[in-house]
Image (cartoon, rainbow, N blue to C red):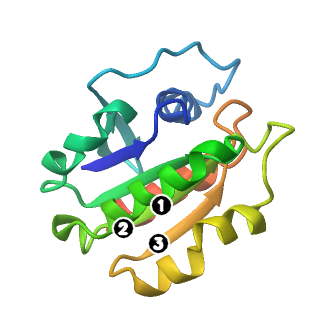
Amino acid sequence: MCLLLGATGVGKTLLLKRLQNILCDELGTPPSTLPTVGTNLTDLTVKKKKVTVRELGGCMGPIWPSYFKDCSSVIFMVDSANIAQISSSCIQLLSVLSAEPLSKASVLILFNKRDMPCTMSLIEIKSLFRMDDIVASATQPITTLEVSARSGEGLKEVMSWLESVTVK
């Protein structure tokens, strides 16, 4: 099981819908979404293997740990266009990385909304997050990617990462 985590409004639901469409080779126009209240389970087929992704609503942050035990990988999304949310996202990420059940989970950190005009550069956001320090002190293998769930930029790389951590 792969968990999809992040604050409210970062684009988790749109990412899942777009990943499903990319598997069908029809990205098309971005579908409308509503904030997730609770959890969404989505099955993606990666190299003929089913991968279940459990999206947890951002408002469920306090109970995310109850979903950690059956998890082998984590996708953590950050809204790179929302500077006011960066510090709270960093705190959430540190909490996820320090959770004992996730100590061996592969982690993908997605900096979403790269298509927005007010987005920080990758260097700026990694600096604010202190990504070098986080990666150095984490027990998990961590990958970072820039994406735009809306435009589709970076989605193939997300699928490649899912393939690398689930198809063995």
Q: Which sits in the foreground, 145 or 78?
A: 78
Q: Residue at x 59, y 51 (%)?
A: 86
Asked if 146 appears above or below 28 in the picture, the reply is below
For the residues labelled 1 and 3, the Cα–Cα distance comes to 6 Å
* Numbered badge on residue 37: none
Query: Tag 3, which secondary structure?
Result: strand
**Amino acid on which the number 2 mark rests in the picture:** Ser
- The residue carrying pointer 1 sits among few (fewer than 14), some (14 to 19) or many (20 or more) residues within 10 Å by Cα, namely many
Q: Which quadrant is home to the C terminus?
A: bottom left
- The residue carrying pointer 3 sits among few (fewer than 14), some (14 to 19) or many (20 or more) residues within 10 Å by Cα, namely some
| Residue matched to label 2 | 106
Q: Position of residue 83 (x, y in %)?
A: 68, 46
For the residues labelled 2 and 1, the Cα–Cα distance comes to 7 Å
Q: Position of residue 146 (x, y in %)?
A: 68, 54
**Amino acid on which the number 1 mark rests in the picture:** Leu
Q: Which sits in the foreground, 44 or 49?
A: 44
| Residue matched to label 3 | 142
Q: Is residue 38 left or right of residue 34?
A: left
**Amino acid on which the number 3 mark rests in the picture:** Ile
Q: Which sits in the foreground, 37 or 110?
A: 37
| Residue matched to label 1 | 108
Query: Tag 2, which secondary structure?
Result: strand
Asked if the residue at tag 3 contacts the one at tag 1, i.e. Cβ–Cβ closer than 8 Å, the answer is yes
Asked if the residue at tag 2 contacts the one at tag 3, i.e. Cβ–Cβ closer than 8 Å, the answer is no
Asked if the residue at tag 1 contacts the one at tag 2, i.e. Cβ–Cβ closer than 8 Å, the answer is yes
